């Protein structure tokens, strides 16, 4: 159904599997065009965010167990249902969705990357011949990445702080000028930058980095990538006691110094859920910075997304891949999978 309300078209949305009472009216900016590209991006979103509501709730930050319990009761009411008291978690999540919306160019980056990393090689169980290949068809990211998340955040912070300092300097100089004399910056730019401090930018970047560190093993890895992550963590633990290896290894590095910008895009897909319990007052500061960081990634996508991949090592194979490709001449491993 479609209706015109205050010169804006609204569409009635029904959530598959939900009762009709959870239907809601949305504007066209909340609806994705039914295209092949959007369907492929939806597959990415499902792989990263297709978890139970309970899991999503566990990722949000709360001040007490009582707050968690209350949020659980509120969210169980379904989409579009507001709390009886307090702020609306879903409205906060919706606002963050606007700031975290990936442009088509970056959606394409995520889709192409997902297809490379999760690519599987079908095996014909009706055939008694050996598998056509000796290793998985998929690839894994080369780690550390050519351009890491930490490098991008450092560049963004430096650039944004320079803009703030320039705006502050211009604002101070403009106060000495006669009324009506034009300034180097527009009024809208001045009001935005003067209200944001360099400390705000630094805290935003450090907070986003910390959130990534926490979210990476829980929500930002495809199932095919988990063996690589676990193998890396195991190697790091072994090298931690070896001072010679420790100097040149990944032991002293944070995950933001190892993983690349593709994983930052994955974080953006999950951010509305991860930040839905944040205070609505923080949106005015965090939201624009999230959008500006996305713009930086889009404008520099060729430099940020190098697409450096390699074949997975044996200890980075999935169990099912080991069973198939280590079956030997009698194909026992592959037939076990078929059974």
Image (cartoon, rainbow, N blue to C red):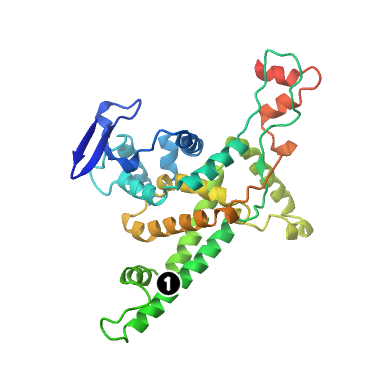
- From the viewer's side, name the closer residue of 202 and 123: 123
- From the viewer's side, name the closer residue of 104 and 84: 104
Percent from the top left, x then y, of residue 279? 34, 55
Q: Residue at x 20, y 44 (%)?
A: 7
Image position of 27 with respect to 133: above or below: below
How many marks are shown on the rendered structure?
1
Q: Residue furthest left?
A: 6
Q: Residues within 10 Å of mark 1 (few under 14, many from 20)?
A: many
Q: Residue at x 32, y 54 (%)?
A: 280
Q: Residue at x 69, y 54 (%)?
A: 250
- From the viewer's side, name the closer residue of 325 and 159: 159
Q: In the image, is 261 to the left or to the right of 269? A: right
Image position of 16 with respect to 115: above or below: above
Q: In the image, is 92 to the left or to the right of 269? A: left
| Quarter occupied by residue 300 | bottom right
Q: Secondary structure at mark 1?
A: helix
Q: Is residue 276 in sight in this rendering?
A: no
Percent from the top left, x then y, of residue 312? 70, 39
| Quarter occupied by residue 316 | top right
| Residue at which label 1 appears | 164
Q: Residue furthest right?
A: 329
Q: Quadrant of the C terminus?
A: top right
Q: Quadrant of the N terminus?
A: top left
Percent from the top left, x then y, of residue 207? 48, 58
Q: In the image, is 230 to the left or to the right of 32? A: right
Q: Is residue 129 in sight in this rendering?
A: yes
Q: In the image, is 160 to the left or to the right of 333? A: left
Percent from the top left, x then y, of residue 55? 45, 38
Q: Residue at x 66, y 41 (%)?
A: 140
């Amino acid at each position: 159904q479609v209706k015109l309300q205050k010169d804006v078209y609204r569409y009635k949305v029904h959530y598959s599997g939900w009762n009709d009472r959870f239907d809601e009216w949305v504007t066209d900016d909340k609806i994705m065009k039914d295209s092949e590209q959007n369907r492929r991006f939806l597959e990415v979103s499902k792989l990263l965010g297709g978890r139970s509501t309970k899991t999503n709730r566990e990722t949000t930050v709360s001040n007490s167990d009582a707050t968690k319990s209350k949020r659980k009761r509120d969210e169980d009411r379904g989409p579009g249902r507001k709390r009886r008291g307090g702020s609306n978690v879903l409205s906060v999540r919706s606002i963050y969705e606007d700031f975290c919306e990936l442009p088509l160019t970056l959606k394409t980056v995520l889709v192409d990357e997902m297809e490379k990393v999760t690519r599987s090689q079908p095996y014909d169980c009706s055939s008694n011949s050996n598998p056509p290949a000796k290793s998985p068809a998929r690839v894994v990211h080369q780690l550390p990445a050519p351009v890491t998340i930490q490098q991008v955040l450092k560049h963004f912070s430096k650039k944004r702080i320079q803009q703030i300092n320039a705006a502050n300097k211009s604002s101070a100089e403009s106060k000495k000028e006669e009324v009506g004399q034009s300034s180097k910056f527009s009024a809208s730019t001045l009001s935005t930058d003067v209200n944001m401090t360099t400390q705000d930018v630094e805290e935003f970047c450090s907070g986003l980095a910390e959130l990534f560190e926490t979210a990476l093993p829980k929500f930002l890895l495809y199932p095919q990538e988990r063996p690589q992550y676990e193998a890396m963590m195991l190697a790091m633990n072994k090298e931690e006691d070896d001072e010679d290896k420790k100097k040149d290894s990944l032991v002293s590095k944070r995950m933001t110094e190892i993983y690349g910008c593709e994983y930052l895009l994955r974080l953006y897909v999950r951010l509305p859920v991860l930040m839905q319990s944040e205070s609505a007052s923080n949106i005015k500061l965090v939201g624009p910075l999230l959008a500006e960081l996305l713009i930086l990634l889009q404008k520099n996508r060729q430099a940020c997304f190098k697409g450096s991949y390699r074949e997975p090592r044996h200890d980075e194979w999935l169990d099912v891949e080991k069973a198939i490709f280590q079956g030997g001449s009698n194909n026992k491993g592959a037939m076990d999978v078929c059974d």
